[in-house]
Amino acid sequence: MNSNEVLILTGMSGAGRSTVAHALEDLGWYVVDNLPPSLLLDLVRKGAQTKSLAIVVDVRGGKFFDDLTEALQLLRESAENVRLLFLDASDQALVQRFESTRRPHPLQGTDRILDGITREREKLEELRAQADVVIDTSNLNVHQLEKRTGEIFAAGMTQAVRINVLSFGYKYGIPVDADLVLDCRFIPNPHWIPELRPLTGLSDEVSDVVLTSDGVSTFVSSYVSLLGQMLPGYLREGKKYLTVAIGCTGGKHRSVSVAREIVRQLNNSKSEVEISAHATHRDVGRE
């Protein structure tokens, strides 16, 4: 079968599938919405000349959705470059979104919105575990989600490993879509330096203090070296997108500085595989 890119887009209702589907269309992907899983293989065969094909499948398909796991397995066996993207969000974020649109959850029935979300989460648990890429949209607005989609899929899923180095604050919770988590709270906190407190790790003044603290330079370069050793294995296993979460207390100073430096070193590193790294700062501005 053809070796073109095939992306199965699924996830929690209200997590942003429509936004991602529209963003993919803008990037040149051919998007098919709400296709019965039993037709996946036929569509991929007929779309042999389509460079990048994205197929949206979700619980709106009712009983047809139950066939997705089996259909996905058949598709992976028959085609190359098949990826599964799962969009997730916290229960609180999903409830707020359904309430704001005044629409019922597809699995809600006569119960509460939260009951529908719980049923869907249980239904999708196995599928989420199989995902090649998971995006947590809890703290993303529409424009941020479009940007994240572009960062991952702008050039299709080539042989490069795309790495999102995500800074965050532990006080706001660990990102649920993180593949790897690194703790920077051992580094002296610029928060206690009055002139640096109002700044963030995006400023050179803060970054200079953080990155010149004892042991930090060795720590960062060692971690980048470790990632370099892991990436060929990830690529062999078909994982081409990686989220590395870098945390400090508030996600404002240390994690931001370290994330930026990791991205710089990754993009300048000599590795067996092509690397495309970028930084996202989840909690900057929340204080």
Image (spheres, rainbow, N blue to C red):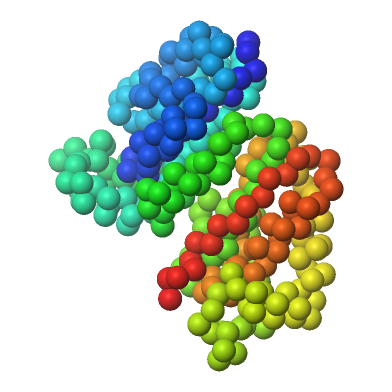
Residue found at x 67% / y 50%: 277
**Vertical comparison of 30 with 105: above or below:** above
Question: As rendered, which of 30 and 225 lies closer to the eye?
Answer: 30
Label count reads 0
The residue at the far bottom in this view is 194
Quadrant occupied by the C terminus: bottom left
Residue found at x 33% / y 55%: 93
Tell me the quarter of the picture where residue 211 sits: bottom right
Quadrant occupied by the N terminus: top right
> x, y percentage for residue 250?
52, 74
Residue found at x 47% / y 16%: 40
Using the rendered image of the protein, determine whether residue 170 is visible from the camera's viewpoint: no
* Left or right of residue 28, residue 138 in this image: left
* Left or right of residue 60, residue 26 in this image: right
Tell me the quarter of the picture where residue 152 sits: top right
Question: As rendered, which of 27 and 256 lies closer to the eye?
Answer: 27
> x, y percentage for residue 104?
20, 41
**Vertical comparison of 56 with 272: above or below:** above
> x, y percentage for residue 224?
77, 57
